[in-house]
Image (spheres, rainbow, N blue to C red):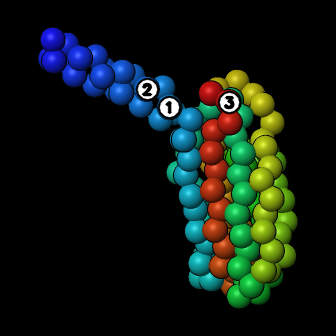
Amino acid sequence: MLKKVLFSLSSSFVLSVMIVMPCFASQSVTLSTDQYWNNSKAVTGKETAFNGSNYKSSKRDTWFIAEYKNSTGWHYNTKKKIAPGKQCPTLNSDKMSRRSWRLQINPYGSDTTGCNAKGKIWVVTY
């Protein structure tokens, strides 16, 4: 009897973890002062959300960009320019068919560095 109860409890736990775990699919990315840009690893879903911070020590505004991948490569979707010392609010990407998404952080301007920033992207709709 005890074995059946333990098996039932462990099975329920495994199933609940399997159901809940995808809800937390996320990736973080950090941009340091010597980088022209940096990308998070990809998450997969129909819609994502992202946020982050451009640290006070940054020399310029920084772009936070949700990018999606299709057969021709990575493409911009939703983006927000954030001043030094400010937070990037939580923004949602457009809702599309299931695909790979990533967060790119890059300093404002052409071929520029000098920014410290961090961000996170996560799946909203699978």
Residue 20 numbered mark, or none: 1
Q: Please name the residue that numbered disc 2 is placed on.
A: 16
Amino acid type, mark 3: Thr
N-term mark: 1 or 3: 1
Q: Is residue 92 above or below residue 4?
A: below
Amino acid type, mark 2: Ser
Q: Please name the residue that numbered disc 3 is placed on.
A: 125
Q: Where is residue 15 in the image (x, y as percent from the top left)?
A: 39, 22
Q: Position of residue 81 (x, y in %)?
A: 84, 65
* Contact between labelled residues 2 and 3, with CB atoms less than 8 Å apart: no
Q: In this view, does 114 lie above or below 95?
A: below
Q: Which residue is drawn at 47% across and 35% down?
A: 21
At label 2, counting other C-alpha atoms closer than 10 Å, the crowd grade (few under 14, some 14-19, many 20 or more) is few
Mark 3 falls on what kind of element?
strand
The extreme front residue here reads 1
Q: Position of residue 90 (x, y in %)?
A: 77, 53
Mark 2 falls on what kind of element?
helix
Amino acid type, mark 1: Val
| Circle nearer the viewer, 3 or 2 | 2
* Contact between labelled residues 2 and 1, with CB atoms less than 8 Å apart: yes
Q: Is residue 5 above or below residue 47?
A: above
Q: Where is residue 78 in the image (x, y as percent from the top left)?
A: 81, 48
| Circle nearer the viewer, 1 or 3 | 1
